Image (tube, helix red, strand yellow):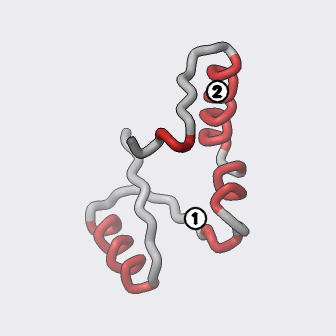
Amino acid sequence: MKTLTVNIEDTLSEKAVTAVLDALKLEYDMEDDSKYKDETERIMTNSYLTEKLNQGRKDMEDGKGTKIAIDDLWK
């Protein structure tokens, strides 16, 4: 199984996408992100994403990561 995430901004697009998924007889879940104040709150309520963030922090503490200065990000 694979997961596809589609960010839908308007009702018309939502209806079109769900119609296609229904026609293909695919299972899907829809989540209304408007209940979150910001992206950070949405991420922190997702156990998978929270686990990945915590693992990344642990990796950095264990010396497994690479620090890049902010000024060097787009070089």
Q: Position of residue 63 (x, y in %)?
A: 63, 14
In the depicted structure, whether residue 41 falls above or below residue 71: below
Q: Name the mark on residue 73.
A: none
Q: Position of residue 24 (x, y in %)?
A: 27, 62
In the depicted structure, whether residue 60 falls above or below residue 50: above
Q: Quadrant of residue 32?
A: bottom right
Which type of secondary structure does the marked residue at label 2 adopt? helix
Q: Nearer the viewer, mark 1 or mark 2?
A: 2
Tell me the residue at 64%/26% (across/down): 55
Label 1 crowding class (10 Å Cα cut-off): few <14, some 14-19, many 20+?
A: few
Left or right: 6, with 51 as reference point: left
> Which residue is labeled 2 in the image?
55
The quarter in which the C terminus is drawn is top left
Q: Name the mark on residue 31.
A: 1
Q: Position of residue 74 (x, y in %)?
A: 41, 45
Three-letter code for the amino acid on which mark 2 is drawn: Gln
Three-letter code for the amino acid on which mark 1 is drawn: Glu
Tell me the residue at 65%/48% (across/down): 46
The quarter in which the N terminus is drawn is top left
